[in-house]
Image (cartoon, rainbow, N blue to C red):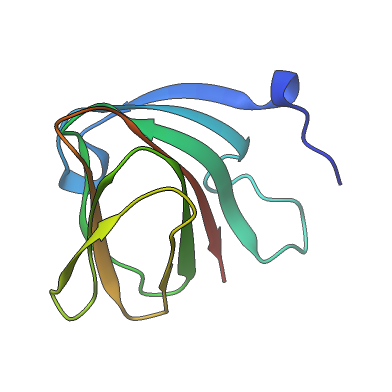
Amino acid sequence: MLFKEAEQKPMVRREILGGSGEAQCLYAIPKGEGPAGSRFKMVGKMTLDAGASIGLHTHEADEEVYVILSGKGAYTDDDGSRHEVGPSDITLTMRGQRHRLEASQEGPLTLLAVIAE
């Protein structure tokens, strides 16, 4: 299955999951619109504006991977530890765990986000 950029769904999201600021998103699979029979619930590229964040949230019934494509930021893990992140860093949040991501004040942070059951 191929999702060409021109066919993906653009969206501007604000205060994602209780976070702050804005993100420009481009979804191959918007949340809740996955192909029938697929375990993928969401696949998208997100660019958080400088200082913007995805709020602390728990993955009760699914798991999420972030692949940092560009920029820098801070990732808060399930245990509350905070880690600096940058290009090529990958985070994994398992079912029942929580996490948060914040772009640095110096510029935007772009990531690929994948949610699967």
Image spot of residue 50 (x, y percent)? 21, 28
Classify 13 as above or below 109: above
Quadrant where the image shows the C terminus: bottom right
Of all residues, the one furthest to the top in this rendering is 6
In the picture shown, does residue 45 fall above or below 6? below
Q: Position of residue 4 (x, y in %)?
A: 78, 28
Question: Horizontally, is 53 left or right of 28 in the view?
Answer: left
Residue drawn at x 14%, y 35% is: 20
39 to 41, vertically: above or below: below
Picture coordinates of residue 86 (x, y %)? 36, 50
Horizontal relation, residue 108 to residue 87: left or right: left
Front residue (pair 38, 93) = 93
The residue lying toward the viewer, choosing from 31 and 108, is: 108
> Measuring 46% from the left and 23% from the top, which residue is drawn there?
11
* 53 relative position to 92: left or right: left
Q: On the image, which quarter does residue 29 sit in?
A: top right
x then y, percent, for residue 88 = 49, 54
Q: Is residue 42 shown left or right of residue 110?
A: right
Q: Number of callouts in the render?
A: 0
Q: Residue at x 41, y 79 (%)?
A: 95
